[in-house]
Image (cartoon, rainbow, N blue to C red):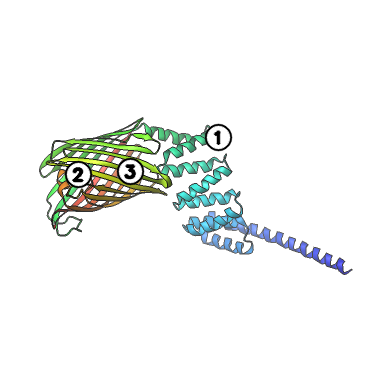
């Protein structure tokens, strides 16, 4: 008799618990609808976050609430909190695509592109027919300038869906850029004056002489790589001069390419002869390194300059350090430039900040600057597509040069260029 009553009580509690649980789940379902409405329709994310937190106190395993909470955090720019919540769901239910998609979006919005690519890689393996994951891979890789990898993924998409417009548009866009040509007109204005100290960059003293620099540049992209021809014109110290330059970037193999360049001038405003040769090699972990040589000829001097660089892609940034070493007793003897470039909507849109010491042989170099003792500089450039097929580039450059022992010259420079892409 006792055993029978005990069994009946146990069955009653089990039934009661099941009914209560069902009612609780039903109430939470209604609460979820309210939270989602607050977040998406009413725009009241604070209320949505509060409702999600309350629901998760009742049932921590209600994944939809945690995903919505993560989404709300992301929309509010609270990416660390969003990542924490969404990772919990992905780890608990790795096949739950809503959680996976929310976490990928969080990584992309917060510029954590390496984490996004890693999660997209596992997602593609789990869902090889899910084209959306591969399309997001292309978007990130194109932004990072990793075009060959993005093209491989586009081909994979077209194998699954031969009529996929996004993948085909990307291939067409890359094909155009690979065989494209462009023409650029560039104008630079430099105001120079003797300054009181080596750290004065803005020129406020009486002006020495304006330096006007105009460059006409044309680029042709050929099968072996781009080739560029430049005609430079300078007006300085009541003198004028021209310089002709030819540059190319031949590709030797995947991940390896060269820079070659030569320049000629009959005026002392430019080096009478300049030459450059540098080999670039892609390395693991998105690094790139180079090693090369520059050679300059000015009146009574022939100057070899050894150059090396190291750079790295990180998310949507490119960071590089370039060093120049020469046996000459001038500012060319030890020079370096550190630059950080941030890519915006695509590789054609970016902003770059740089700083350096010594005279760079890759800059707009006049023959006079080679004999300076020291230099320090910084500046920025911004490049934007402002119309289809047109780019505009604007830059500000500030430097201070030691012309003689304890004698300094400030240089405030502006540059603007317009490029037409064909």
Label at residue 160: 1
Circle 1 SS class: helix
Q: Is residue 68 above or below residue 227?
A: below
| Residue 141 x %, y % | 44, 43
Dot 2 or dot 3: first in sequence order is 3
**Are there few (<14), some (14-19), or many (20+) residues within 10 Å of tag 3?**
some
Between 223 and 234, the one nearer to me in the picture: 223
CA gap between label 1 and label 2 equals: 53 Å
Q: Tell me the residue at 47%/36% (across/down).
A: 152
Between 34 and 192, the one nearer to me in the picture: 192
| Residue 254 x %, y % | 40, 36
Task: Find the residue positioned furthest to the bottom.
Answer: 2
Dot 1 or dot 3: first in sequence order is 1
| Residue 291 x %, y % | 31, 43
Q: Quadrant of residue 274?
A: top left
Q: Is residue 411 above or below residue 156?
A: below
Dot 1 or dot 2: first in sequence order is 1
Q: Tell me the residue at 55%/59% (across/down).
A: 48
Label at residue 290: 3
**Are there few (<14), some (14-19), or many (20+) residues within 10 Å of tag 1?**
few
């Amino acid at each position: 008799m006792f055993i029978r009553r005990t069994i009946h009580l146990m069955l009653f509690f089990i039934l009661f618990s099941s009914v209560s649980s069902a009612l609780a789940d039903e109430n939470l379902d209604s609460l979820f609808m309210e939270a989602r409405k607050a977040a998406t329709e009413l725009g009241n994310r604070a209320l949505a976050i509060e409702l999600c937190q309350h629901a998760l106190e009742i049932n921590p395993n209600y994944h939809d609430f945690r995903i919505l909470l993560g989404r709300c955090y992301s929309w509010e720019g609270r990416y660390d909190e969003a990542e924490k919540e969404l990772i919990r769901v992905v780890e608990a239910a790795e096949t739950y695509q809503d959680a996976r998609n929310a976490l990928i979006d969080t990584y992309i919005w917060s510029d954590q592109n390496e984490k996004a690519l890693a999660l997209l890689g596992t997602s593609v393996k789990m869902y090889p027919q899910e084209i959306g994951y591969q399309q997001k891979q292309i978007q990130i890789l194109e932004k990072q300038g990793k075009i060959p990898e993005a093209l491989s993924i586009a081909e994979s998409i077209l194998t699954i869906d031969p009529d996929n417009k996004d993948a085909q548009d990307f291939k067409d866009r890359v094909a155009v850029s690979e065989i494209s040509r462009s023409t650029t007109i560039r104008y630079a204005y430099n105001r120079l004056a003797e300054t009181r100290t080596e750290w004065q960059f803005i020129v406020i003293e009486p002006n020495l002489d304006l330096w006007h620099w105009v460059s006409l540049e044309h680029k042709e992209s050929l099968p072996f790589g781009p080739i560029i021809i430049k005609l430079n014109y300078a007006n300085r110290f009541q003198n004028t001069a021209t310089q002709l330059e030819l540059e190319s970037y031949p590709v030797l193999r995947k991940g390896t390419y060269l820079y070659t360049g030569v320049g000629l001038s009959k005026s002392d405003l430019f080096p009478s002869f300049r030459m450059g040769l540098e080999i670039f090699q892609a390395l693991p972990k998105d690094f790139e390194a180079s090693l090369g040589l520059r050679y300059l000829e000015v009146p009574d001097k022939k100057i070899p300059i050894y150059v090396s660089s190291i750079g790295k892609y990180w998310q949507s940034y490119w960071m590089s350090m370039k060093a120049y070493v020469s046996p000459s007793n001038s500012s060319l003897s030890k020079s370096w430039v550190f630059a950080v470039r941030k890519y915006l909507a695509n590789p054609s849109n970016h902003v770059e900040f740089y700083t350096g010491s010594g005279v760079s042989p890759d800059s707009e170099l006049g023959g006079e600057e080679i004999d300076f003792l020291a230099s320090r500089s910084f500046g920025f450039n911004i490049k934007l597509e402002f119309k289809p097929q047109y780019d505009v580039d604007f830059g500000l450059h500030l430097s201070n040069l030691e012309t003689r022992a304890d004698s300094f010259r400030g240089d405030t420079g502006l540059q603007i260029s317009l490029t037409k892409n064909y």
